[in-house]
Image: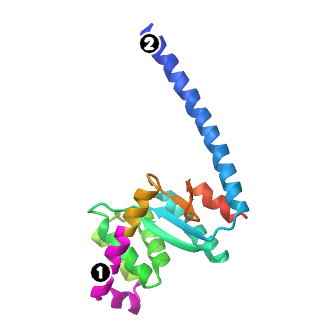
Amino acid sequence: MVLLRSYSQLLWIERKLQLKSVAKLFFLISLASSVDAEQVTNLIEFFSFTCSHCANVNQKVYSYVSKNNIQLTDISMDMSEEALPTTMMFYVAEDAGIGNKFKQAYFGAVSAGMPAYSNTTLNYVVGQIKTAKLTELLNSTSERQRVKDKLQYAAGLINKYQIQVTPTFVINNSTVLEGEEIINQLSQR
């Protein structure tokens, strides 16, 4: 009898999850529709360099914000001790005006089998995107402080919006949406 009760509970949970999934889908569709109706002026993207979904939507995000003149703030969720050098280098690349090139090169390197967060991968990516401005910033003491400030800002936003998964998008500092299908929906407008 206990086994049957457990199986019944399992079926009940499964039905609930399916309902929640369907409800979540309708919620996301209605939310995306309401976002379609409003003017998107700024977009925050929370991403990870090890997230294949983030890699899938990266170019779509940049195309969307460029086409629609939207302010984009990229926030790396990679804050572990192992990942921090990669995140810091990304923020330096952003300040050099090549943040997207860094992301694309890093996503490509990881996709090709290079280990995420390793010095080898980081050096490879920097070698691929290096510019005079990047070199200048790498040698700048004021840039170190800017990167520290960006890390604190990122941690504050992660906490404020309670971000748990990537990619997650915050539209106009108020609407939080998870998953790559969101940017696909917005891009099709």
| Res. 163 image quadrant | bottom left
Q: How many marks?
A: 2
Residue 160, labelled with which disc? Answer: none
Q: Position of residue 72 (x, y in %)?
A: 54, 72
Q: Residue at x 50, y 71 (%)?
A: 73
Position of 140 with respect to 161 (left or right) is left
- Pointer 2 residue: 3
Magenta span of residues: 130-152
Q: What is the three-letter code of the residue carrying label 1?
A: Arg
Position of 114 with respect to 69 (left or right) is left
**Colouring convention used in this rendered image of the protein:** rainbow
Q: What is the three-letter code of the residue carrying label 2?
A: Leu
Please check the rendered image and state whether residue 7 is part of the magenta-colored stretch, yes or no.
no
Position of 174 with respect to 116 (left or right) is right
The N terminus appears in which quarter of the rendering? top left
> Which circle, 1 or 2, is nearer the viewer?
1
Q: Residue at x 49, y 76 (%)?
A: 100
Q: Secondary structure at mark 1?
A: helix
Please check the rendered image and state whether residue 146 is part of the magenta-colored stretch, yes or no.
yes
Q: Position of residue 57 (x, y in %)?
A: 56, 63
Q: CA distance from mark 1 to mark 2?
A: 60 Å
- Pointer 1 residue: 144
- Could you classify mark 2 by the number of other residues whose Cα lies within 10 Å: few (under 14), some (14-19), or many (20 or more)? few
- Could you classify mark 1 by the number of other residues whose Cα lies within 10 Å: few (under 14), some (14-19), or many (20 or more)? some
The answer to whether residue 75 shows anywhere in this view is: yes
Q: Secondary structure at mark 2?
A: helix
Q: Identify the main secondary structure in magenta.
A: helix
Q: Residue at x 67, y 44 (%)?
A: 26
Depicted 13 relative to depicted 54: above or below: above
